[in-house]
Amino acid sequence: MHRRATVALSLLPLLCSGCIVPEDQKPTVAIGSTFATKFVHRGMTLVDNPVWQPRMGVGLPLTNGDTIGLDAEANMDLRNDTGGAWFPDGHAGRFSQIEAVASYQKRIGDVSLRAGVHNYNLPNGLEFVNGERGATSEVFLVASTEVLEATPYIGINYDFDEVRGGYYRAGLTENIPLGDKWALDLDGSLSYASEAQASWLYGLGENGLADLRGSLALQYRYDQRTLLNVAAHGSAMMNSTQDRWFRDLGIDDDPIWFSMAVQWTF
């Protein structure tokens, strides 16, 4: 992990050193696995072929009702050919992006806040045609609340490491129960990228609206610990210059993809 990311991630436990974990509480551990037909990140099609994405998260409850979270996930290319995408070819069976997140979650009245540090590592970053991409880290804050059974949210991400730029997102989610075991989960959002962030993400630095994205997921609660999920996702670039740039590079600028996931919680 990048040195500055390690320092930043280590700050979170220090900030919470005055908090005490309840004696009768244990950490919550979630382990999951997703198979997806593409890998899309903030509107950029990184891999235009099937991928596997394992993840693990740990949540530590505190006596004041807040929660410390530590999460890790990765993307593995399943084919050497990445298709009409940003990531380089030739890495089937290897991780092409690895992420680590340290977060602190707190509720103030009706508003839920989650803040922390997010580290990205691109093991094949030296092979990018439009310039080297390696490890970088950002701080983030997500605020959400409930309005008429839906949950609007705002996310602020600022890369303090390699990029020195921001990515901002506003959206709405809703979980619709379909009986005791089934539920429909909806999520839609629109984002804005600064010039530096757009240059890092898309290879062309122009600030403005970025990706409009949406997903529809059908969830099935198999038992108390097991959650199954099948979903359809879509994304479109709202910046016409970026959209044309993607097409010129042969990258899918309006991807639609599907995923199947399972999560176990202990």
Image: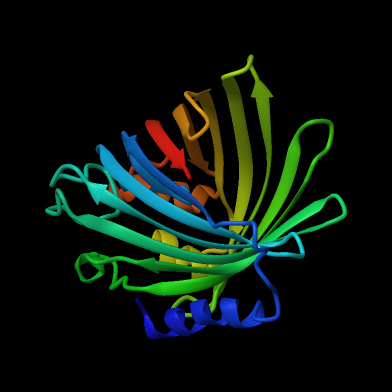
Q: Residue 254's spot in the image, x, y percent? A: 43, 37
Left or right position of 70 against 148: left
Left or right position of 214 against 115: left
Q: Residue 61's spot in the image, x, y percent? A: 64, 60
Residue in front for this viewpoint, 73 or 42: 73
Q: Which colour scheme is used?
A: rainbow
Residue drawn at the location 62% of the way across and 17% of the way down: 180
Left or right position of 235 against 53: right
* Image quadrant assignment for residue 140: bottom right
Q: Residue 71's spot in the image, x, y percent? A: 47, 59
Left or right position of 184 against 143: left
Does residue 266 show up?
yes
Residue drawn at the location 68% of the way across and 32% of the way down: 174
Does residue 204 show up?
no
Residue drawn at the location 54% of the way across and 27% of the way down: 216
Q: Residue 250's spot in the image, x, y percent? A: 28, 45
Residue in front for this viewpoint, 84 or 101: 101
| Viewport quadrant of the N terminus | bottom left
Residue in front for this viewpoint, 111 or 168: 111
Asked if 132 appears above or below 216 in the picture, the reply is below
Asked if 206 appears above or below 216 in the picture, the reply is below
Q: Residue furthest top?
A: 179
The tally of labels here is 0
Q: Which residue lies furthest to the front in this view?
A: 24
Residue drawn at the location 15% of the way across and 42% of the way down: 79
